[in-house]
Image (tube, helix red, strand yellow):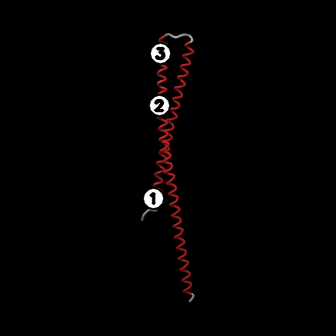
Amino acid sequence: MTKKKSDRLALVHDLAVKKREKADQYLAESRQRMMQAETQLQQLESYLREYQEQFTQSGKQGFSSSQIVSHQAFISRLQHAVRQQYQTLYLARDQYEQVLKHWQHSYAQAKGLEKLHDKALDVEQVQRDKKEQRQIDERSQLTQRSGFFSSD
């Protein structure tokens, strides 16, 4: 005996739900990576500003040329780290957008299959109701016929 359409759709729907749940997980992980990249960038920029302000305040007392060169080299490395972190954040945001699109597709697919499954269940219920009504009608006709013949 073949399985009912609703049973077959239930299996496919279950697979789509599992796929959506995986997409939920990937989306959360991607969002976390993006937020970490944003936090690291903010921390680097804050540290760079603080260091520059501190150097400016200390500079009022005077610096040797080697201290200035050392400071400029450190500032350059910090600025390079900030640029790299911007790139990391850009990539994390891009990845998040891609994962979000995948998640939206998975969600829509699962929702669509759920609707198809529900519709198949409704159709099967209508078919069962019609079959039951036919059986009731047939019994009623048989009862009427047997009553018609027995009254003779």
**Where 79 sits versus 151, above or below?**
above
Image disc number at residue 8 = 1
- Amino acid at the residue labelled 2: Gln
* Image location of residue 101, percent across then percent down: 49, 44
Q: Residues within 10 Å of mark 1 (few under 14, many from 20)?
A: few
Q: If the image is split into quadrants, where does the N terminus sit?
A: bottom left
User: Of discs 3 and 1, which sits in the foreground?
Assistant: 3
Q: Earlier in the sequence, mark 1 or mark 2?
A: 1
The nearer-to-camera label among 2 and 3 is 2
The reply to whether the C-beta atoms of the residues labelled 1 and 2 are less than 8 Å apart is no
Question: In x, y percent, where is residue 100?
Answer: 50, 42
Q: Position of residue 44 (x, y in %)?
A: 52, 26
Question: Number of numbered discs present?
Answer: 3
Up-down relation of residue 141 to residue 74 (above or below): below
Question: What is the distance, in whole Å, between disc 1 and disc 2 at their CAs?
Answer: 47 Å
Q: Which mark is residue 70?
A: 3
| Mark 2 element type | helix
Amino acid, disc 3: Ser
Circle 1 SS class: helix
- Does residue 83 appear left or right of residue 151 in this picture? left
| Measured Cα–Cα span from mark 2 to mark 3 | 26 Å
Q: Secondary structure at mark 3?
A: helix
Identify the amino acid type marked 1. Answer: Arg
Q: Residues within 10 Å of mark 3 (few under 14, many from 20)?
A: few
Q: Residue at x 55, y 80 (%)?
A: 143
**Badge 2 or badge 3: first in the primary sequence:** 3
Labels 3 and 1: the sequence-earlier one: 1
**C-alpha separation, residue under disc 3 versus residue under disc 1:** 71 Å
Q: Where residue 113 is drawn, which disc sits there?
A: none
Q: Residue tagged by mark 2?
A: 87
Q: Residues within 10 Å of mark 2 (few under 14, many from 20)?
A: some
